[in-house]
Amino acid sequence: MIRLPSLSKPYHAFVTFDEAIVQPPAAPEPLDMESDPPPSDEMLAAHKEALETHGKALEEHFAKMRAARQTGDWGPVTVPGKHPLRFLMRQMPFDGWAVVNGMMQRQENEEDILLLAVQLCLMEIDGAPIVVERERHPRLGDVASLSCLSRLGNRNGLRAAVELGALAINKAGADDF
């Protein structure tokens, strides 16, 4: 299958659970409402204030993450002295987008949709000795083999696929997948 050259350029993506990425602030400990004696009004007010402060801190954290994704400047959300894995992604090809969009319209399994999106867009992984191998898809031609993500570990590989797949779908034009 001949693919026309694209005017859009590849981009780097990062996964937010990477230990080199600043993590969101931890939530305050929940109050034990069944304790004897129950929490005082002062304790309830203090806990409410702590939850509001945490909510604002989360909004600020996610605003920084959105800005990093939009601008490509990951410095403000990177832990000093650490280097996150960089996933080189390409824009989703039109024929791939047609298949992914069709799967979404038919409300097929979300995990299958995200995995296909990653296969269509993932080109390289920088920062780890992992080679992205290619395999032949029966309808879409040359795609990334998902075995490279399994080298991140079962849990992290799936988390990376979900996050990168959603990013690829959103960049292709879906509204907040």
Image (cartoon, rainbow, N blue to C red):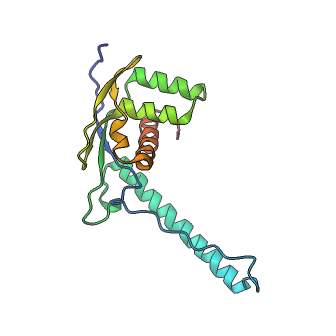
Compare residues 78 and 19 and report the one nearer the observer.
Answer: 19
Residue at image x 31%, y 49%?
Answer: 72
Residue at image x 48%, y 22%?
Answer: 99
Give the position of the N terminus as an image quadrant: top left
99 relative to 15, above or below? above
Q: Residue 110, how many percent across, how many down?
A: 55, 35
Residue at image x 59%, y 74%?
Answer: 29
174 relative to 34, above or below? above
Number of marks in the rendered image = 0
154 relative to 114, above or below? below
Q: Is residue 55 left or right of residue 141?
A: right
Residue 109 is drawn in which quadrant? top right
Q: Residue 48, how many percent across, how many down?
A: 65, 75
Compare residues 147 and 168 and report the one nearer the observer.
Answer: 147
Q: Residue 14, how many percent across, how many down?
A: 35, 49
Residue 98 seen anywhere in this rendered image of the structure = yes
82 relative to 98, above or below? below
Q: Is residue 41 left or right of residue 74?
A: right
Q: Residue 142, how many percent across, how many down?
A: 32, 22
Residue 174 seen anywhere in this rendered image of the structure = no
